[in-house]
Amino acid sequence: MALHKIFRAVIMGPPGSGKGTVSARITKTFGLKHLSSGDILRANINAKTELGLLMKSCIDQGQLVPDDVMSRLILSDLRALDQSSWLLDGFPRTVSQADALDKAYSVDTVINLNVPFQTIKQRLTSRWTHLPSGRVYNVDFNPPKVPGLDDVTGEPLVQRDDDTPETVTRRLKAYETQTDDCKNVFPYRSKGVLQSFSGTETNKIWPHIEAFLHSKLSSVDEKCEDL
């Protein structure tokens, strides 16, 4: 779909809610640039930039990366896309981060994936990974041919620390505490740009998101043509 006006969107949802899958489909269907805060963070840490070293220090000490550092990092990348439409994934996660983004850019829509935590726990704790390649299996719907072994190499699969039941519960609780305030208090619900999509299966949620964005982008283009 060709866009006639710059369109800026944010996608929100707990870990394991399907943001990565939905983001990939949005960028492919609508041509938005996809910015993942996790990818940006890892790239800066690997490149040993000033902010990357600061963030690594926080992470190594088991601390959260300060809001102002995360905001500087993401807004720096967004400035390089001033003339592009984009989809921001993983940021903002706090009211302070949302405030920083709101001061710099006007967001056209915020897509919120509302997936039950019990469904997410089941998804994440059923994941097993082949660490050298990054291949991920799910014992419920994408199991390895031989239990516990990678299909390609036959090497053992492991459950990442992030996918253990205790860690999943902690991550979901942290998301609920931080991000619900961001969604509901400032600034998205009050501005009328927050749109939630509920369900337990990404493939069933996606058609509703696609239809919503087609409608949203069509109305944006019509306003642009009227100017």
Image (cartoon, helix red, strand yellow):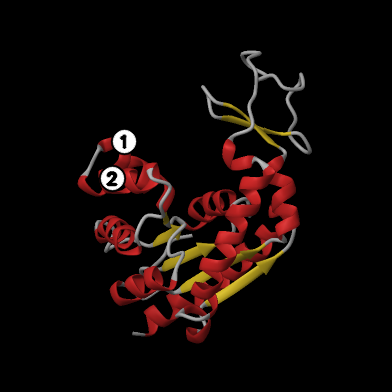
Residue 219, relative to residue 202: is it above or below? Answer: below
Label 2 near label 1: C-beta < 8 Å?
yes
Residue 52: mark? 2
In the image, what residue occupies the spot 61% across and 62% down? Answer: 210
Dot 1: what SS?
Answer: helix
**First reached walking from the N terminus: tag 1 or tag 2:** 1
Q: Position of residue 84 (x, y in %)?
A: 32, 61
Does any portion of residue 36 appear in the rendered image?
no
Q: Residue furthest toward the front? A: 61
Residue behind mark 1: 46
User: Looking at the image, which residue is at 54% across and 25% down?
Assistant: 131
Few, some or many residues within 10 Å of mark 2 (<14, 14–19, 20+) = many
- The vertical placement of 105 against 127, above or below, is below
Q: Residues within 10 Å of mark 1 (few under 14, many from 20)?
A: few
Q: Let me know if residue 165 appears in the view.
A: yes
Image-quadrant location for residue 88 = bottom left
* Residue 86 position within the rendered picture, expressed as x and y whole percent measured from the top left: 39, 60
Residue 65, picture quadrant: bottom left
What amino acid type is highlighted by mark number 1? Asn
Q: Give amino acid for label 2.
A: Gly
Q: Position of residue 135 (x, y in %)?
A: 59, 29
Give the residue displayed 38% in from the left and 79% down from the top. 225
Q: Where is residue 26 drawn, in percent x and y?
A: 53, 56
Q: Nearer the viewer, residue 166 or 108?
A: 166
> Outermost residue toward the left?
50
Point 66% across, 67% down: residue: 197
**Quarter containing the C terminus:** bottom left
| Residue 88 located left or right of residue 55 | right
Real-space Cα separation, disc 1 to disc 2, in angstroms: 7 Å
